[in-house]
Amino acid sequence: MDVAKDTRKQPDHTDMDEDSSHHNFSIQQATTEHLHLAPRIAATMEESAKARGTGIGKRSPETIANYIREGKAVMAFHRDGRWAGFCYMNEFDNGAMVSNSGLIVAPEFREHGLATLLKKELFDLCRKKYPEASVVGITTSPAVMKINTALGFYPTAFSDMPRDEKFWKGCELCVNHDILKRTGRKFCLCTAMRFDPTVKVVSTERAL
């Protein structure tokens, strides 16, 4: 598969709060040194889902730990050492597709643009590890949709998501799973988004 020339806009961090700048945060690929954070990450995800009252599939601490062990996760830390954020990738359909999932930012660091930095770091890692794969995700978050659009994703049908059963297994613990099940995986409250390296997408969104 040929990879099209990258026409994505680079994120503009000049309007971010000073506390969320690159100078104050370290964003890095997670390692086994971070395994002790898995329970906290899982708990933060669950608390966020309850607060929003909408679809965030639960992840167990062991599931999160497995992504860390496999080198598929990205972590963010404040300069004072506090954990600040997390997200991970997973491959499907024999590597033809890779997901960006599990984005979570610690409550004290929200609303300052850290989600954008995490998503960009994970996206770059996905492109490096799987250069010919489509990058996909499903979300109910307008903020995540905006970040994805700036990275070159476009909204698409659920039929364009992976056929691999393990992709959909993550939806089973979501409060909206009954909608997905009743519609035969054709519709849900989430929006499906996809980055296809063979398709050029010109974003109309302001650079993030």
Image (cartoon, rainbow, N blue to C red):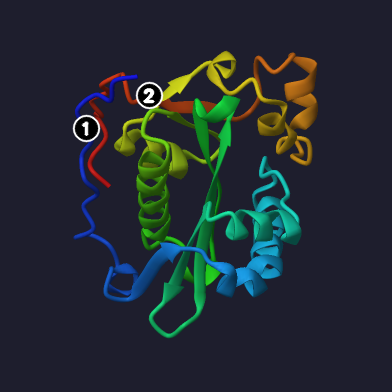
What residue sits right under mark 1 in the picture?
6
Instruction: Look at the image and tell me in which quarter the N terminus lies.
Output: top left
Residue at position x 44%, y 23% from top? 155
**How far across and how far down the image is residue 104, in percent?**
55, 56
Q: Of callouts 2 and 1, which one flags the residue occurring earlier in the amino acid sequence?
A: 1
What's the amino acid at mark 1? Asp
Q: Residue at x 28, y 68 (%)?
A: 22
Task: Give the amino acid type for the residue marked by disc 2 in the picture.
Answer: Asp
Residue 150 vertical placement versus 94 (above, below): below
- Indicate left or right for 69 with 50 as reference: left
The answer to which of 136 and 106 lies nearer the viewer is 136
Q: Nearer the viewer, residue 158 or 66?
A: 66
Q: Residue furthest bottom?
A: 80
The residue depicted at 25 percent of the width and 21 percent of the height is 200
Q: Position of residue 198 (x, y in %)?
A: 31, 19
- Graded by Cα atoms within 10 Å as few (under 14), some (14 to 19) or many (20 or more), the crowding at tag 1 reads few
Determine which quarter of the picture holds residue 106: bottom right
* Above or below, comparing residue 109 to residue 132 in the picture: below
Horizontal side of residue 93 vs 24, given as left or right: right
Please rate how many residues cluster around mark 2, counting C-alpha atoms within 10 Å: few if below 14, some from 14 to 19, many from 20: some
Which image quarter: residue 179? Answer: top right
Which residue position holds label 2? 196
The kind of secondary structure element at disc 2 is: loop
